[in-house]
Image: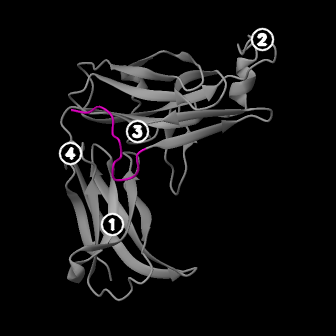
Amino acid sequence: MKTMNKLMMLGVFAVLMFGFAVRSHAILLTETQVLINPKDRVASLTVKNTSSESEVFRFEFNEMYVPEGRGLKLLEEGETVEGLNAASDFIRFSPRRLKLAPGQVQQVRFLVRRTKDMKDGEYRSYFSLRPEPKVPGVDGEPEKGMVETGLKVGVGWRIPVILRHGKLAVEGKLRDVRVEEAGGKTKVHFTIEREGNMGLMGSTRVVCVSDGNAVLGQGGARVYTERKQVKSFVVLKDGTQGCKDMVLEYTALPDDPVFSGGLIASAPVN
C-alpha cells in the first residue's frame, strides 16, 4: 500500500517558493501531505532544491488546527482542541537538517511508533520546512546564532502529516446545495458534514446526468477531525447553465481506508 497520497485527482506537484529580502529559496515537493494508513510503518517525503545555489533546511513538527472559516492556527502551549490528536507523539523523522546542492533530491523518512494504548482514529501534525539564511562569505554555511533569526521571520512551508490507526469509521453528507451567480461566474455552494473518527478528503464535481454525466466543474474538499462540517463550492464551466439535472458528487481519494476511492456522498443541485 502506498504510504503517500499523490493527490492524482487534485494535481501532481506542488512548487513551494520561500523568500528573504536579500535572496530567494526554492524547493520542490512531490507531495502536498504525508498520509500514513493503519498498516503502514514508514513514509517518505521527497525534497528537491530547485534553486541555483546550495540550500540548508531545518525540519520540525508543529501542532496546528483548522478553525471555523479558513486558514490554520498554531496551538498554544497547553491548548487542546476537541477531535484533534497530535501525530508527532508517534512519529520520528530523519534527517532534521538537510543541505542540498542545486538540483539535488533527498528523502525525509518518517518512522511510525504505534503504542498499545493508542485509540482508534486519525492523528495529525504539521511538518515544517524552513530555510536557514546564509551568511555572505562563509561558503554558504549558516552562521551559528543566525538560524533563530531566520525562523522568526516565519518563512517556510508546512504540510500535514496524517496518521491513521486501528478501526476507522466515517460518514459524509452533502447539504445546503445551491447555485449562485457572482462576478460573471456560476458556483455550486454546499456544506459537507462529517461524522466519525477520521477526516474526509476527496474531490468534488458537478455532473450533468442527461449529458452522460459530463463534468461541469470540479474541485477538492476536506473536513479534518476537529471540524464537523465545512462549506465549499465548485465553479461551473461557462455555458453549462442549460443542464436541468445536475448532481454534486464527493469522491474519496484512492487510498482512503474506508471508501477506497469510492463515492462518499452525492446530492442533486437545485
Quadrant in the picture for residue 182: bottom right
Quadrant (top left/top right/bottom left/bottom right) for the N terminus: top left
Q: How far apart are marks 1 and 3 (CA)?
A: 28 Å
Secondary structure beneath dot 2 equals loop
Inspect the magenta stretch and tell me whether residue 9 lies in it.
Answer: yes
Q: Specify whether 258 is left or right of 130.
A: left
Relative horizontal placement of residue 29, taking residue 170 as reference (left or right): right
Q: What residue type is labelled 4?
A: Ala
- Say few, some or many: other residues with alpha carbon within 10 Å of mark 1 (under 14 / 14 to 19 / 20 or more): many
- Residues at marks 3 and 4, CA–CA distance in whole angstroms: 16 Å
Q: Do the residues labelled 4 and 1 touch (CB within 8 Å)?
A: no
Query: At which x and y percent is residue 76?
Result: 58, 33
Mark nearest the camera among 2 and 1 is 2
Mark 2 vs mark 4: give the one in front.
2
Q: Which mark is residue 169?
A: 4
Residue at left offset 60%, top offset 24%: 102
Q: In this figure, what is the number of numbered marks?
A: 4
**Which residue is found at the position 19% from the left and 55% from the top?**
262
Disc 4 to disc 1, C-alpha distance: 24 Å
Residue 133, by quadrant, is top right
Report the Cα–Cα distance between label 2 and label 3: 43 Å
Other-residue count near label 4 (Cα within 10 Å), few / some / many at <14 / 14–19 / ≥20:
some
Whether residue 41 is situated above or below residue 80 in the rendered picture: above
Q: Which amino acid does label 2 sit on?
A: Val
From the viewer's side, name the closer residue of 36 and 95.
Answer: 95
Which residue is tagged 3?
A: 84
**Camera sees residue 62:** no
Q: What stretch is highlighted in magenta?
A: 1-12
Q: Which mark is residue 205?
A: 1
| Residue annotated with mark 2 | 138
